[in-house]
């Protein structure tokens, strides 16, 4: 893309640091084990369709083994252990993640398709930061404002998606361990490898057997975990559809649930905003991680008076993005995670054409193999269009305009979701006013997609409930 402006030589990160095994078992009770009733499936590199490894699809018996191990470890070892001792293990994991960060980053980019620049500079550092942060809480739980002696729930079943495979695992495992719970983690079927490497790190950190278990597989494995009566809490991140099904399943039981689901966030640019800064924020908001981000700024709401300027500057900026090999350190846009997701993006973008919106992409050569979609901007979008309402989960931005702050609020809140929002303006009072009006769990001001383990994250309405991160994130794993 626009390589004429500034030619870049390829700068690929070496794959040699990753030691892929031909096939992987399950991580149960501190060991990698062969499945009892599981089968095997492949995970591929979405940028080349190369098969990376065979992975186990765990069956109900395998899930039961993992839950039994977790339950025993929770009751006998991890629950009774003083918080300051649990903290040492969490610090150990955090340091090992840092030590093995290059390996983790390369593996994540291989299995997921995201640019190495992002896995190296965003995902993996945040993974370590999460473990460091929650390590600090482990011996201070009675001061968390959740009662004088909050108790762990027991076994946490944790189901994570493919967009931030290791980061979502860390968001789930770190607070669960800090609070004395044990875990059975189910990574997504297209991105199981970094969770299996984390299992190795758990071994290396000498966690007591059964404290962390990893069962790979697809929806059926996740469903078996949800069904298991020995699981005291389910933490799920993924699609709203599956989240609703899990909620129905757990309704009326004593088992606890947190859901982090989809989004259709508004990124709102006022006429007084610093335009080039806002353009960077728009790009980061929707093209970071190929737009596979639940809190992506997928609806740009721009004030009419500056709409042409902003869209013009945005298009020029997009001309400079480089799409291609995820392991190349110059790459801005990597591969779409799966052919299924690519189909979904194509279908929704097609609906944008059919409903009368105007599609634009920079000139861009897509590689022959693998799953790719160019960065795309739709203008002339009406609020009723599917591309303005449905989560595309891809590098596709829908641009709408507004005239007044009230109209911006009304349009931003006109969604079934409520996960995040962005506001770009020079006026501090307007930021505070907007933050109060917006029905979103996170509101970023003059920035976007900024994460920190100390800050709670989570949604309203169909974006789910419960918070991850910060002191609030402890609540999801404790009984006051
Ligand atoms: P998904 O919700 O099916 O997958 C998420 C996780 O749930 C995976 O680990 C999957 O194996 C597991 N799962 C699937 N069915 C299950 C069941 N019945 N019981 C328990 N676990 C189950 O999401 P999918 O199909 O990969 O993506 C579809 C759409 O969902 C995307 O296009 C995107 O719009 C949205 N999505 C949102 C995410 C977010 O972070 N909010 C993450 C992933 C997808
Ligand atoms: Mg994969």
Image (tube, rainbow, N blue to C red):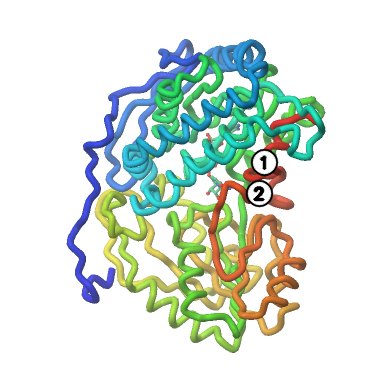
Residue placed furthest toward the left: 9
Q: Identify which residue, 193 or 222, lies in the foreground.
A: 193
Residue contact between numbered discs 2 and 1, judged by CB atoms under 8 Å: yes
Q: In which quarter of the image is the N terminus?
A: bottom left
Q: Name the residue under label 2.
A: 456
Q: In which quarter of the image is residue 375?
A: bottom left
Q: Does residue 120 appear in this view? A: yes
User: Which label is found at residue 473?
Assistant: 1
Residue 157 falls left or right of residue 8? right
Q: What element carries label 2?
A: loop
* Displayed quadrant of residue 135: top right
Measured from the top left, where is residue 386 in percent x and y?
60, 63
Q: Is residue 47 above or below residue 207?
A: below
Residue 346: in sight, yes or no? Answer: no
State the residue lying farthest toward the bottom.
305
Residue 129, how many percent across, how many down? 51, 43
Q: Compared to 160, does 431 lie above or below? A: below
């Amino acid at each position: 893309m626009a390589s004429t402006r500034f030619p870049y030589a390829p700068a690929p990160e070496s794959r040699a640091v990753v030691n892929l095994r031909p096939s992987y078992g399950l991580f149960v009770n501190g060991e990698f084990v062969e499945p009892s009733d599981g089968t095997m499936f492949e995970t591929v590199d979405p940028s080349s369709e190369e098969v990376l490894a065979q992975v186990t699809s765990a069956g109900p018996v395998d899930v039961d083994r993992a839950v039994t191990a977790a339950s025993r470890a929770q009751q006998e070892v991890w629950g009774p252990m003083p918080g300051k001792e649990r903290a040492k293990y969490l610090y150990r994991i955090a340091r090992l993640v840092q030590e093995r960060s290059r390996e983790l980053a390369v593996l994540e980019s291989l299995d997921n398709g995201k640019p190495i620049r992002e896995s190296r500079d965003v995902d993996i550092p945040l993974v370590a930061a999460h473990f460091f942060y929650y390590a600090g809480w482990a011996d201070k739980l009675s001061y968390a404002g959740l009662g004088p002696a909050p108790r762990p729930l027991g076994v946490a079943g944790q189901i994570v998606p493919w967009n931030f495979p290791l980061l979502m695992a860390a968001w789930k495992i770190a607070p669960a361990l800090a609070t004395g719970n044990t875990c059975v983690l189910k990574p997504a079927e297209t991105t199981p490898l970094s969770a299996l490497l984390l299992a190795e790190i758990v071994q290396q950190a000498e966690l007591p057997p059964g404290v962390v278990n990893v069962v790979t597989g697809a929806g059926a494995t996740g469903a078996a975990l949800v069904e298991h009566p020995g699981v005291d809490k389910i933490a799920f991140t993924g699609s709203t559809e599956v989240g609703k099904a899990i909620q129905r399943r757990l309704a009326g039981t004593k088992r606890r649930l947190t859901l982090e689901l989809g989004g259709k966030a508004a990124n709102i640019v006022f006429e007084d905003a610093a335009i080039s800064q806002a353009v960077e924020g728009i790009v980061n908001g929707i093209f970071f991680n190929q737009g596979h981000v639940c809190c992506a700024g997928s609806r740009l709401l721009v004030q009419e008076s500056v709409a042409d300027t902003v869209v013009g500057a945005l298009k020029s900026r997009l001309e400079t993005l480089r799409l291609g090999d995820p392991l190349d350190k110059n790459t801005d846009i990597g591969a779409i995670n799966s052919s299924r997701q690519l189909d979904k993006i194509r279908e929704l973008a097609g609906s944008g054409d059919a409903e009368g919106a105007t599609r634009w992409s920079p000139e861009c050569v897509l590689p022959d193999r693998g799953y790719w979609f160019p960065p795309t901007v739709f203008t002339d979008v009406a609020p009723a269009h599917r591309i303005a309402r449905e989560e595309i989960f891809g590098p596709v931005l829908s641009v709408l305009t507004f005239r007044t702050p009230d109209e911006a609020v009304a349009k931003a809140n006109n969604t079934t979701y409520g996960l995040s929002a962005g506001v770009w303006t020079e006026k501090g009072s307007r930021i505070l006013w907007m933050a109060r009006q917006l029905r979103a769990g996170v509101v970023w001001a003059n920035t976007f997609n900024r994460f920190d383990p100390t800050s709670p994250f989570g949604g309203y309405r169909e974006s789910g409930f419960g918070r991850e991160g910060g002191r609030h994130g402890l609540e999801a794993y404790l009984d006051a």
